[in-house]
Image (cartoon, coloured by chain):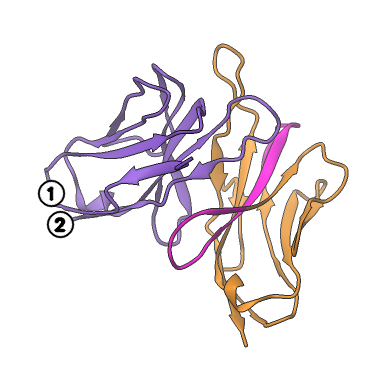
Amino acid sequence: AQKITQTQPGMFVQEKEAVTLDCTYDTSDQSYGLFWYKQPSSGEMIFLIYQGSYDEQNATEGRYSLNFQKARKSANLVISASQLGDSAMYFCAMRERSSNAGGTSYGKLTFGQGTILTVHP
Amino acid sequence: NAGVTQTPKFQVLKTGQSMTLQCAQDMNHEYMSWYRQDPGMGLRLIHYSVGAGITDQGEVPNGYNVSRSTTEDFPLRLLSAAPSQTSVYFCASSYAGGRYNEQFFGPGTRLTVL
């Protein structure tokens, strides 16, 4: 079963409008983290926002906010006031609680398939 | 800081050839990992390391070897390249422990196997 599901292969939005990119996840862990990354056409992976499973408030970073609904296991990315430069692939990712034999936790990520966002002028 | 660097940026191989993709980071991160990105499949974890001398398999390890002799370097070896290994490869690193564990990604290596 998919651990991270992004059901929107492509999304279109008008410049200056808001857009929501969907992400649902599946885990039995109580402690986990959710990330969103942006990948423009140039190919690099750009970190956007992080939400911890115990965070009581939704994460915000500038024009990015994360609509975290823990009971529904969803972590949707909201981009406000879209700009032409927001056109890119967006990935949702989850870090479950992982540790080695020494008890050190580390950041192994599971990614969704991505959503291509196109911003129209 | 250079962050996470990868070489080469592009590579074309013939089936059966071997090669090593290089990855280095100068942030003193304990955790390093390799992902491959294929169209429509997102990024999938190949191998990872939680420190020098410690490596483990990810989701798609077959056909790849790794080693971690230093904190800074984490090379990925293709033993006998196959067309199915045509992909974009990303190296990433992060601190171990803590709450955040944000991964920093390298620029990627685009590999084509003919």
Which of the marked residues, 2 or 1, is nearer the chain's N terminus? 1
Which amino acid, by three-letter code, is at mark 1?
Thr
Q: Where does the image place residue A101, in percent across and percent down from the top left? A: 55, 12
Judge the density around disc 2: few (<14), some (14-19), many (≥20) Cα neighbours within 10 Å.
some
User: Residue A81, position in %: x, y?
Assistant: 74, 75
Which chain corresponds to the colour purple?
A: B
Which percent across, then down, holds residue B16?
Answer: 11, 43
Q: Where in the figure is residue B53, as x and y percent of width and height?
A: 39, 16
Instruction: Judge from the rendering whether residue B100 lies leftward or rightward of residue B69; answer left or right.
Output: right
Q: Is residue A37 magenta?
A: yes
Residue shown at 19%/47% (left/top)?
Answer: B82
Report the quarter where the C terminus of chain A lies.
bottom right
Left or right of A88? Residue B10 is left
Range of magenta residues: A27-47
In the image, taking residue B12 as reference, residue B47 lies left or right, namely: right
Q: Are marks 2 and 1 on the same chain?
A: yes
The residue most toward the top is A102
Q: Which residue is mark 2?
A: B114
Q: Amino acid at mark 2?
A: Leu
Chain the render paints orange: A
Q: Residues within 10 Å of mark 1 (few under 14, many from 20)?
A: some
Helix, strand or loop at disc 2?
Answer: loop
